Image (cartoon, rainbow, N blue to C red):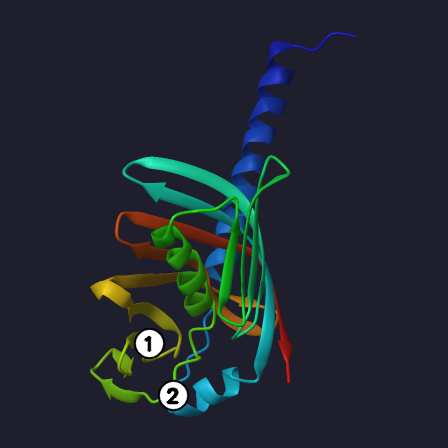
Amino acid sequence: MSFSKEYWHNALTFLKINVITLVLCAACAQRGIVIPVREGIDLRDELTRMESITSLDASFTIEFVRDGSTMKGDAVLRLTPEDLDLRVYSLGFLVSEVTSHEGLTKSTPPIERTRLLLLIDGIRNSFFWWSIEGYEIDEDDAAFFVTNSWRRIVFNKRTLLPVRQMINLEEGKELHIFYEDPQPLDGVWFPSKMRIELSFYTVHIAIRELSFAHR
């Protein structure tokens, strides 16, 4: 059986229309996500509520950038306020493991100190952004500024979600964290994309899955 040129033209047109429809539906669905407005809620109460989270498990893509050189991988993270276990895979093979337990940090294979600080302090504080103590709160028309002696977090005033963070490290170094694309993850609104910067390093994180344990 043979088909005419008109048949194939109509079939191709039908296929294109369906593909475009699927793309538009996906885009509309994405735009349909509405972040809850939390104006009127005390930010201190929100931070206290988040402190009920005792640990989290996450999987995400991770991208290291330095001087234009880029390394990409898939990461699995187990994190508590005290401990960190990060494993990075490439093409399904374990290429790096970083752990922090009771103040002792290890990496396999060994990595330089700046990169280790970026991973340990950057990832811990970027995920556990609510774990700040001895802080004061200032505000302007659009944001709250939560600050203590070594850390400053900027929160969107309408959503009470973090926008960026600055952390003072030893030797005058500053670690910067930027948050984007909040999503409902395991019942918690959470930034699904993060960018961590320290010295000449930048780390991009895009969360795939995230789960929490509560006390």
Disc tally is 2
* 132 sits to left or right of 210: left
Above/below status of 50 relative to 76: below
- Distance (Cα) linking label 2 and label 1: 9 Å
Callout 2–callout 1 Cβ contact below 8 Å: yes
Quadrant the N terminus occupies: top right
Residue at (59%, 78%) from the top-left corner?
54
Q: Amino acid at mark 1?
A: Phe
| Label drawn at residue 56 | none
Q: Amino acid at mark 2?
A: Leu
Q: Is residue 43 visible?
A: yes
State which tag comes first along the sequence, 2 or 1.
2
Residue at image mark 1: 155
Check disc 2: other Cα within 10 Å, few if <14, some if 14-19, many if 20+.
some
Check disc 1: other Cα within 10 Å, few if <14, some if 14-19, many if 20+.
many
Is residue 86 or residue 73 the one in the foreground?
86
Residue at image mark 2: 43
Residue that protrudes farthest toward the right in the picture: 1
Which x, y percent locates residue 24? 50, 46
Which x, y percent locates residue 3? 70, 11
Which x, y percent locates residue 185? 57, 67
Circle 2 SS class: helix
Q: Is residue 41 visible?
A: no
Circle 1 SS class: strand
Residue at (56%, 26%) from the top-left corner?
13
Q: Quadrant of residue 130?
A: bottom left
